[in-house]
């Protein structure tokens, strides 16, 4: 049996910006025409983390029939918690906005806006990590990699961290049910490769190098070691607005964050579809380009 998962990320929907909503509908049209069974969205779903933006995205997802736990999995990005610089919050006020924000409330708002997608999740009392089983063969693991505000380590909310409690709870969840023979996919927002390794997009690599101190995932090594221990097969992520794949410690990392707002010279909107053959226990990867 075939099972298709579309991966998209960083669509940054703004309420007042209709163009992004039109592009998101076009992306969903492509996903739906390709008969994808499930969509995974790895954060920065909205731009300023306000109700109207989340409602805009919800209505598009619902229109295409994907607003359901079996059909949709989501994790937050920094913009879904902290938002971004905007007309309401100018750049010089943004660090104070990040400092004063109620992180836990924003995480809970995110959960509520996409509550249908959490219907079939298995988790502890916290929202993240969660685990869900798709089609009996595929395990989705959802993590929140958005680090809390820190004057030194995360002054504008863009850096990443997965706290010890999330990793501990994840190991506990895996102890509780039989995961053998199942395909394991992690969803999180932040990336793992080095900026210099993006040889195909030199301008992008240079931009990322200059932004490095504001874009990094803090406890990368511990996270990768935990994924290895859990025998994770694929990691889906976003954050740096490029579409690419790479290998790390025998795991495949897939980044579809150039699907709608690419930071590349070509400006091509690309995303990935993972097609699983559940009898053969294999999958193939297709890169789609919508414009
Ligand atoms: Fe983003
Ligand atoms: Fe991001």
Image: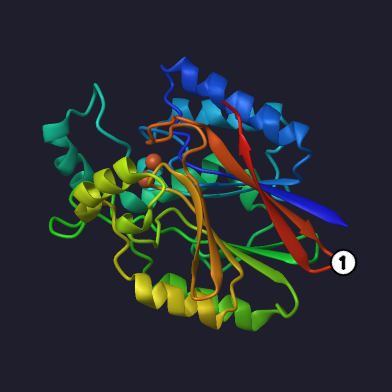
Q: Mark 1 points at which residue?
A: 279
- Give the residue displayed 58% in from the left and 32% down from the top: 58
Q: In the picture, which quadrant includes the C terminus? A: top right
Q: Position of residue 112 (x, y in %)?
A: 53, 44
Q: Which quadrant of the view contains residue 83? A: top left
For residue 288, side relative to residue 259 (left or right):
right
Q: In this view, does 10 lie above or below 159?
A: above
Residue 150 location (% of width, % of height): 19, 57
Vertically, is 94 above or below 221?
A: above
Q: Residue at x 36, y 75 (%)?
A: 221
Q: Residue at x 33, y 51 (%)?
A: 103
Q: Quadrant of ligand 2?
A: top left
Residue 268 can be seen in this image? yes
Res 207 quadrant in image: top left
Q: In this view, does 186 lie to the left or right of 210?
A: right
The N terminus lies in quadrant? bottom right
Q: For numbered disc 1, what is the local secondary structure? A: loop
Name the side, left or right, on which 56 lies relative to 224: right
Dot 1 surroundings within 10 Å: few (below 14), some, or many (20 or more)? few
Is the residue 214 above or below the residue 92 in the image?
below
Q: In which quarter of the image is residue 225?
A: bottom left
Q: Ligand 1 within 8 A of label 1's CB? A: no
Residue 158: image location, x then y, percent: 28, 49
Q: Is residue 205 left or right of residue 214?
A: right
């Amino acid at each position: 049996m075939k099972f298709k998962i579309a991966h998209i990320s960083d669509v940054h929907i703004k309420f007042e910006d209709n163009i992004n909503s039109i592009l998101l509908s076009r992306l969903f049209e492509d996903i739906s025409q390709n008969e994808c069974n499930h969509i995974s969205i790895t954060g920065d779903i909205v731009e300023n983390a306000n109700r109207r933006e989340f409602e805009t995205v919800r209505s598009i997802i619902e229109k295409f029939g994907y607003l359901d736990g079996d059909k949709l999995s989501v994790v937050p990005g920094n913009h879904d918690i902290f938002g971004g610089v905007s007309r309401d919050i100018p750049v010089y006020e943004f660090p104070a906005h990040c400092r004063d924000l109620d992180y836990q409330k924003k995480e809970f708002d995110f959960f509520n806006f996409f509550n249908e997608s959490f219907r079939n999740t298995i988790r502890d009392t916290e929202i993240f990590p969660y685990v869900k089983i798709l089609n009996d063969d595929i395990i989705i693991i959802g993590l929140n990699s958005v680090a809390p505000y820190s004057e030194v380590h995360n002054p504008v909310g863009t850096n990443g961290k997965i706290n010890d409690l999330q990793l501990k709870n994840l190991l506990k969840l895996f102890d509780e049910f039989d995961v053998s023979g199942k395909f394991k996919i992690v969803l999180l927002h932040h990336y793992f490769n080095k900026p210099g390794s993006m040889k195909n997009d030199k301008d992008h690599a240079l931009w990322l190098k200059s932004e490095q101190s504001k874009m990094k995932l803090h406890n990368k090594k511990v996270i990768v070691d935990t994924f290895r221990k859990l025998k994770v097969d694929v990691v889906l992520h976003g954050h740096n607005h490029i579409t690419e794949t790479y290998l790390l410690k025998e795991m495949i990392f897939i980044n579809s964050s150039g699907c709608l707002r690419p930071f590349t010279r070509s400006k091509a909107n690309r995303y990935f579809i993972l097609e699983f053959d559940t009898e053969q226990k294999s999958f193939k990867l297709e890169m789609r380009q919508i414009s």
